[in-house]
Amino acid sequence: MHPQVRPSHYDAINLARPEGLEPPAYWFEASRSIHLSYGRVLVPLYKPMSAASSSREIEIKLRIEDAAEGRRRLERAGFQITAPRVFEANLVFDAEDGRLRAAGTLLRVRQAGQRSALTFKGPAVFGRHKSREELEIELSDASVAAQILSRLGFEPVFRYEKYRTEFRHPDQAGLVTLDETPIGDFLELEGRPDWIDQTASRLGFTEPDYITASYGSLYAEYCRTHQMTAAEMVFREKRP
């Protein structure tokens, strides 16, 4: 899961860092929708942040040399951009005793462009693909969500950033995202297991290429390999 990183403080829970990488406000991840506002909760309304959102997430990651290579592979396989490239900031929360991490669950707030959301992920089932429960709600104000989580006794433990572009094939139901991260670039395939296998093959990958680790785990591994102290998986400078 995510590395156990406990920052001394997050004054504004600085997640959102649009093009200048200057964090203005809170940021968080999710997709299903209860709209929140100061002083009231509006009527719950199902509205997934991504059309791929469901109660059960099945996915793999594939490491690529760079984003340009990923786009070439996807275009050759007939995939088209359905959501343009956007800067995405994520903040993972846990209780003071770390019980969410210990249980293999995830509580996260994400902001992607002008959209923000809150996500819960259940314990992962690992096999050829990774499968886990995923519950998400879209938020109108991530800062309010952060305050609510804080009032409930949760604290931010890990921040990570990426640029994400979504792709779909006109005749298929699955989703491919191209993720540019501070530790390298990846394709993430989400859908039915048979679709994932067929798509990975069309993109030029085989089963040994499948990655089921989370970005938090990949970051922790990256830090060990490069003899770095694990902190935040964030960009040090703006990407074009």
Image (cartoon, rainbow, N blue to C red):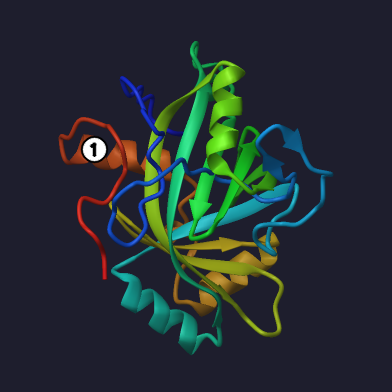
> What SS does tag 1 mark?
helix
Percent across and percent down for residue 190 are 61, 60
Kindly identify the residue that appears in the image at 31 percent across and 43 percent down.
233
Residue 38 makes an appearance in the image: yes
How many badges with numbers are in the image?
1
Comparing 36 with 129, the one in front is: 36
> Which quadrant of the figure contains the C terminus?
bottom left
Percent across and percent down for residue 92 are 48, 34
Badge 1 amino acid: Cys
Q: Which image quarter: residue 78? A: bottom right
Furthest residue to the left? 227
Q: Which image quarter: residue 173? A: bottom right
The residue that mark 1 highlights is: 223
Comparing 206 with 22, the one in front is: 22
Q: Is residue 232 above or below residue 115?
A: above
Comparing 37 with 160, the one in front is: 37
Residue 107 makes an appearance in the image: no
Percent across and percent down for residue 144 are 58, 35
Kindly identify the residue that appears in the image at 59 percent across and 51 percent down.
129
Q: Which image quarter: residue 52? A: bottom right
Circle 1: is it few (<14), some (14-19), or many (20+) Cα within 10 Å? some
Kindly identify the residue that appears in the image at 67 percent across and 85 percent down.
170
Q: Is residue 131 above or below residue 154?
A: below
Comparing 64 with 110, the one in front is: 110
Kindly identify the residue that appears in the image at 69 percent across and 45 percent down.
137
Percent across and percent down for residue 66 are 30, 70
Position of residue 178 in the picture relative to residue 21 (left or right): right
